[in-house]
Image (tube, rainbow, N blue to C red):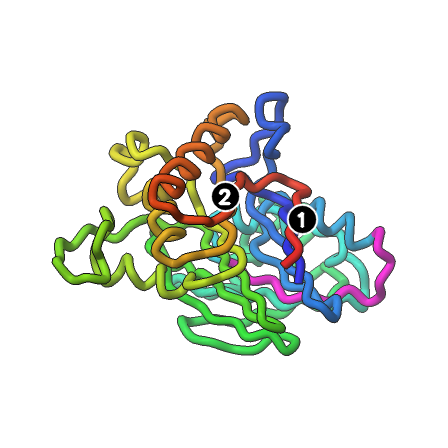
Amino acid sequence: MKYKFWGVRGSIPTPGPETVGYGGNTACGELTLDDNNIIIFDAGSGIRVLGNDLMKRGKKPVEAIILLSHTHWDHIQGFPFFVPAFIPGNKFVICGCEEADVKLDQIITDQMKSAYFPVELGDMPASVGFKRLYEGKFKISGARVDTLYLNHPGFALGYRVEYNGKSVVYVSDNEPYPIQESDSPEFEGMKYKGNNNYRIINFSKGTDLLVHDCQYTPDEYKTKVGWGHSPYDYVAEIAWKAQVKRLAIYHHDPGHDDAYVNTIVDAVKKILQEKGCPTEVFGAKEGMEIVL
């Protein structure tokens, strides 16, 4: 398998010279299985660039499963600009959880109504289907996919994909659950204690690549509790306890320039080094490809 980052920013696209190193497009990743079937994670503005690349590859028809972490704008705003969806014969299934009062297909349809966009979803020539997901497991092209509810306003899912002995965990938009003090041995050395926080550790256990929201510093997080994003010390704790092989710092804050993202990456590295944790840590960059 190989994983490629097409959008790594959170909240809103941030083009400009200060973000060109990591990139300004919002969330989108591509996981290519060994048989060249692909799974797309999220449909932020990065999916536009992915779509252009898929067209250049010349494979016909283009088919893919799109796994949405959730349906906030920065995770769906690129789909109206996804060129393969304008080509007859192509086929896509958009999967994700639904809000309590609105279905998944309605959310995607609504953002393409004529008041917001000149082409409505029903006018796209490609086949676009929808599948509601819950916490559980299922198969895609021979790969096992596990899902986990995340701590984010509304409903959000994390994904673990296992294929041919390798795994990727995608956790975009997640924050710590309230800390529950405990003397249980499993929480030894942890700041973010509690069974709910440990669920994400078990979900990520031993993965070859963990792609995790790391939008805030601990100081920034103090004033943003409840916004659904992670401080870097929490992400470091997950990587350490889960013994992940590689950690991609992801969902960069729109207010953080390249230099600031570097400081967050370095801070996570320092925490893990002090714990003797061998996890490889890097900041996710647009165009970066990881072979698993």
Question: Toward which corner of the image does residue 101 lie, by quadrant?
Answer: bottom left
How far across and how far down the image is residue 107, in percent?
A: 51, 58
Report if the CB atoms under discs 2 and 1 are less than 8 Å apart. Answer: no
The residue indicated by pointer 1 is 289
**Residue type indicated by callout 2:** Val
Q: Crowding near pointer 1: few (<14 within 10 Å), some, many (20+)?
A: some
Which quarter of the rendering shows the C terminus?
bottom right
Which is more toward the observer, 92 or 196?
Answer: 196
Structural distance between the alpha carbons of marks 2 and 1: 14 Å
Q: How many marks?
A: 2
Report the residue that reaches farthest toward the top.
Answer: 17
**Residue type indicated by callout 1:** Glu
Which is more toward the observer, 110 or 181?
Answer: 181
Which quarter of the rendering shows the N terminus?
bottom right
Left or right: residue 192 compared with residue 134 = left
Q: Earlier in the sequence, mark 2 or mark 1?
A: 2
How far across and how far down the image is residue 38, in percent?
A: 68, 64
Query: Magenta stretch: residue 65 in it?
Result: yes
How far across and how far down the image is residue 241, in percent?
A: 34, 56
Question: What range of the chain is rendered magenta?
Answer: 56-68
The residue indicated by pointer 2 is 281
Report the residue that reaches farthest toward the front.
Answer: 276
How far across and how far down the image is residue 124, in percent?
A: 72, 59
Left or right: residue 85 compared with residue 74 = right
